[in-house]
Structure formats: C-alpha cells, structure tokens
C-alpha cells in the first residue's frame, strides 16, 4: 500500500521540480543581491519615501514574477509529464505527444534560461521608470547599481538555471523519453556543445566576477562620489563601504560560481561515467551493458556510438554462435581472424570416422522427435570429446562423424590426439548408454576407425557457397577401417600409420594385415580395446577383465 502513495509523491515532486528549482535559485540570488544593495542603500535613494516605494515594488514584482514563472513552467512541461505518465503505464503515447514532449525536454534548459533573462530585463526597465514616475528624481547611483547588479545577477541566474535544468532533464526526463538514445535524430532540439558549455562556465566563474569588480569601482569613482560629493563621503567611510561591498560581491560570485561548477560537473561526470562503465563491461565480456544517453552533445554522440558498437558485438557474437553450430569452433576462429583463404594445402593429418551400428533398424518405430533428440545428445558428447583434444568435427554424415586432427590448425602430435579422442569418444558413449538404460531407451553401438596420411585441406564449392573439407585417400581409408569394426566386433580400430609411434603408450591388439575396399595396398590394423571387450562388443563404459594386449 505504501508503494502507491510513494509513486504518486515522486510524480508530483518531479512535476514541480524544475519550477521549484528555478524559484529557489531566484530567491537565493535575490538574497545575495540584497546584501550588496544594502551597502549601496545610503547612496541610491533621493528620499525615504522613494526607498519605501522601491521596496514595495520589489516585493510585489518578486511575488508576481515567481507566480507567473511557476505557472509558465508548469504549462511548458505539461506535455513532458503527460507522455511520461503514459509510458509509466506501459502504454505508447501518440506520435504528436511524444514528439512534443521530447522537444520540450530537450529545449527546457534554453527555454528556462530565456524566461529567466526576460524577467530580469523586464525588472531593469520597469523599476527605474516606475520609480521616476511615482517619486522623482531617481539618482544616477540607483540607475547604475540597478543596471549593474541586475545584469550580473540575471546573467548568473540564467547560466545557473540552464545547468540546473539541464541536470534535471538529463537525469529524470530525457532517458525516459529517449530510451534508445539518438537525441541528435530529433529535429528541432537545441543544446549547447561541450565546448560551448565549457566557455559558458569560464565566462561565469572568471570573466563576470572580474568585470563586476571593475564596474563596481567605476560606479564608486564616477557616479557615487560625483553625485554625493566628495566632502560628504570621508576616506574612512569610503574604504569601509568598499570593503563591505567587496565581501558581498565575493560571496555572491563564490556561491553562484560554485553552483554553476557543481551543476556542470554533475552533467559531465554522469555522462562520462556511463560511457566508461559500459566500455569496462564490454572489456569484461558483458555485452548486456548499454550507455544511458541523456544529451545531444559530444558525450551523447559518443554514448550512441558505444551503444551501436555493443549492438554490433552482440550481432557478431550471435552470428559466431550460430556459425559454430554448423562449423567447427577452430575453423570459425580462423575464418574470423582471416587465416583461411580460398584454395587448399596438403597436410598430414589423422582422421577419425565414427558411425552408429545398426542405426536403420534402431530408428524403425521411433518417433522423429525422439530420434533427433537422441542423436543430438550423442553428437554433443562425441563432438565434445573431439574438440577436447584439439580436433575438428569436419562434418556429420547422417549418423556418422568425420573428425580431423592437424587441420585447419597443423599439429605435430595429431596421431596422439586422435587416439586420445577416440578413447574419450568410447568412454562418452558408455556414459550415454548408461543414461539411456536409466531412461528405458535403446542403447547405441558405434564403430570408430582411425587413420593418418596426407590430405588436401581447403575451401571448395561455388562462388556463393563454400565448405571447408579434407579430401584424400586417408579419409576413405578411415571410413573403410571403421567398417572393419562391425566385422571384428572391435569398437575402435586404428591403422599402423597412426598407432606406429605410440605402440608403447596405448594397449592394443593386432588384427593382422588387411586390404580395404578401394585400395590396392594392404594395411596393418589394431584394436585399441582389450580382447575381452572386443568379443563382448560393448560400448557401455564398464571396466573389462584384463586380457594381455599385444605390444
């Protein structure tokens, strides 16, 4: 129940934030201005009656201007808050309302600054002329001090109001109305550039105070002393007045300048921090981060470009992930790095050909969805074992797997890696079958053939579609060796070309000299599993009884 009143309070507070902020700034500046004018009071009025009229006019003007200022601000911001209420209800405002709200929010700092300057210019013209009509004569000191302090106080208030309203708009309004940034794409929006804001801050905190000090001395020398008479103002009194005025002016300039710098620093710090945090998140690999763009200046444009970069990186990541589903990760990485070109090279590699035994009879009577789900689980385990050893799954041929070691990345130990991968595939199949038994699903049996030799590895295809593949006798021999697994009941059969350098490392059993289909030369082939496992023909991953292998 508390959440609803709190939300309502926040909406009301935001609705009146800018008007109250500007009225507060005006009240504060009038207090500082009054401290200076009190020092000039003895020299500004021709009579006490004139002083009373001026004080009454000041109070009336302040009340009326504050009220009018407040009403004009509410009217100006009405489309902004109407659009924000619509968005808060998860509804879409009309295009006309949203465009008007965006323009009002973007131009609010300029509009408020112009309104502030208008009220101050009106005061500079109204006060002296009304006073001259009601209670003449008006002293030159009054004209000079009113013009000088009115111009400077109005300038300070205009600049401070600009930065204060800019801060509110950038924190509370613009991020809601421009959730995707790109404020520069909104026609009719106005904003000072970062350089323009920097120049404005310099003029406010450096040039204006110095100019005010100089003009104050000029007013004393050529207006006050001439009008009051040098004999009336003693040197001690003049020094005292000037010290008091210097203190008042210093406090005035310090407070107003500090407020301008703080509001300017908040805007710059918030924007640069948002960009920095987003870039740091991307550096860590987090592509969910975005820059909350809240300005039309250079930092806002930088934020838009960073967001576009992040979107591009997300798209690239999505493409790479999708690409990895069709192409081996190693090949994907080399393609992105520009390491693979059209054509081919001859490499010595090791080939694994793995095929499911009796797949046709196994799949009969099974629903297609179940078959696909089973094969996907099986291929995931098999491919994982290949990739773990640095191999490349070149392609899936029906229910068979063709894996390559030594291409596209040449590896001197490709034979050793292929043997380790084949043994890992056998163990993975055992784990797969254990899960199948637990679920009451059929088990799979697979044969694995391994051979090493020269192949042509490269990109082949058409101008519109290419495929990275390996071509050569070694590929055909690996497939023929896999066919021997069904004849011999051995799950893994390896040629001597692969096992030769590693006979002392891996237990094996010689299957003799064979001649495979499509090849005139004979091959010496070996089973990488103990004889007991070969005769059982199991792929369940269970530990077999020890049968001394041939070495």
Image (cartoon, grey):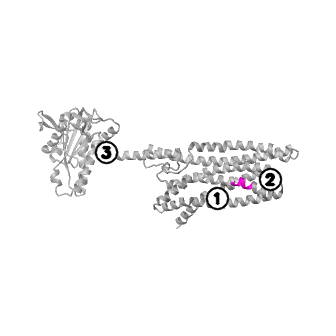
Gap in angstroms between the C-alphas marked 2 and 1: 29 Å
Location of mark 2 (residue): 138
Location of mark 1 (residue): 69
Instruction: Locate residue 467, reporting x and y percent.
Output: 25, 40
Gap in angstroms between the C-alphas marked 2 and 3: 85 Å
Q: In this view, does 65 lie to the left or right of 496?
A: right
Choose mark 1 or mark 3, whichever is in front.
1
Instruction: Locate residue 74, reporting x and y percent.
Output: 59, 61
Q: Quadrant of the C terminus?
A: top left
Q: Main secondary structure of the magenta part?
A: helix
Which residue is at the far right?
Answer: 231
Instruction: Locate residue 48, reporting x and y percent.
Output: 83, 57
Location of mark 3 (residue): 323
Q: Which residue is drawn at 22% across and 58% down?
A: 440
Q: Which residue is drawn at 18% across and 54% down?
A: 363
Q: Which residue is drawn at 70% across and 61% down?
A: 63
- Element type at mark 1: helix
Q: Is residue 457 left or right of residue 337?
A: left
Q: Which residue is drawn at 61% across and 54% down?
A: 112
Choose mark 2 or mark 1, whichever is in front.
2
Gap in angstroms between the C-alphas marked 1 and 3: 61 Å
């Amino acid at each position: 129940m508390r959440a609803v009143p709190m939300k309502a309070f926040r909406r009301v507070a935001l609705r009146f934030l800018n008007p109250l902020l500007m009225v507060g700034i005006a009240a504060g500046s009038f207090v500082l201005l009054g401290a200076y004018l009190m020092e000039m009071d003895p020299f500004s009025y021709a009579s006490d009656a004139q002083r009373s009229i001026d004080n009454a006019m000041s109070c009336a003007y302040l009340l009326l201007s504050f009220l009018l200022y407040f009403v004009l601000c509410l009217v100006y911001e009405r489309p902004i808050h109407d659009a924000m209420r619509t968005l808060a209800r998860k509804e879409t405002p009309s295009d006309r309302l949203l465009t008007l709200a965006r323009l009002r929010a973007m131009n609010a700092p300029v509009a408020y600054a112009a309104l502030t300057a208008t009220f101050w210019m009106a005061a500079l013209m109204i006060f002296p002329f009304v006073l001259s009509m009601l209670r003449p004569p008006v002293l030159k000191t009054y004209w000079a001090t009113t013009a000088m302090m009115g111009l400077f106080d109005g300038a300070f208030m205009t600049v401070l109001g600009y930065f204060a309203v800019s801060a509110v708009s950038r924190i509370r309004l613009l991020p809601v109305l421009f959730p995707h940034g790109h404020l520069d794409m909104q026609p009719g929006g106005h904003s000072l550039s970062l350089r323009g804001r920097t120049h404005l801050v310099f003029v406010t905190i450096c040039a204006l105070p110095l100019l005010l000090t100089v003009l104050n001395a000029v007013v004393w020398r050529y207006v006050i002393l001439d009008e009051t008479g040098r004999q009336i103002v003693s040197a001690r009194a003049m020094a005292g007045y000037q010290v008091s005025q210097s203190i008042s002016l210093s406090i005035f300039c310090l407070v107003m300048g500090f407020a301008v710098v703080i509001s300017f620093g908040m805007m710059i710090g918030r924007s640069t921090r948002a960009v920095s945090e987003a870039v740091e998140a991307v550096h860590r690999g987090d592509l969910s981060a975005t820059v909350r763009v809240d300005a039309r200046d250079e930092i806002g444009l930088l934020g838009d470009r960073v967001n576009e970069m992040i979107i591009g990186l997300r798209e690239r990541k999505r493409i790479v992930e999708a690409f990895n589903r069709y192409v081996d990760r190693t090949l994907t990485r080399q393609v992105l790095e520009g390491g693979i070109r059209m054509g081919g090279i001859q490499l010595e590699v090791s080939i694994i050909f793995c095929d499911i035994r009796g797949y046709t009879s196994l799949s009969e009577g099974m629903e297609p969805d179940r078959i696909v789900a089973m094969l996907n689980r099986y291929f995931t385990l098999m491919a994982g074992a290949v990739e773990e050893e640095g191999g490349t799954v070149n392609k899936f041929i029906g229910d068979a797997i063709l894996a390559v070691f030594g291409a596209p990345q040449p590896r001197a130990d490709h034979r050793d890696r292929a043997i380790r991968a084949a043994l890992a595939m056998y163990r993975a199949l055992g784990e797969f079958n254990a899960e199948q038994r637990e679920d009451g699903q059929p088990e799979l049996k697979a044969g694995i053939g391994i051979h090493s030799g020269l192949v042509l590895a490269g990109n082949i295809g058409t101008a519109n579609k290419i495929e990275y593949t390996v071509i050569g006798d070694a590929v055909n021999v690996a497939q023929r060796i896999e066919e021997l697994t069904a004849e011999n009941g051995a799950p893994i059969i390896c040629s001597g070309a692969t096992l030769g350098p590693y006979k002392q490392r891996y237990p094996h059993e010689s299957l003799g000299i064979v001649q495979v289909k499509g090849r005139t030369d004979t091959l010496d082939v070996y089973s990488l599993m103990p004889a007991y496992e070969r005769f059982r023909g199991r792929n369940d991953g269970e530990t077999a009884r020890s049968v001394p292998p041939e070495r």
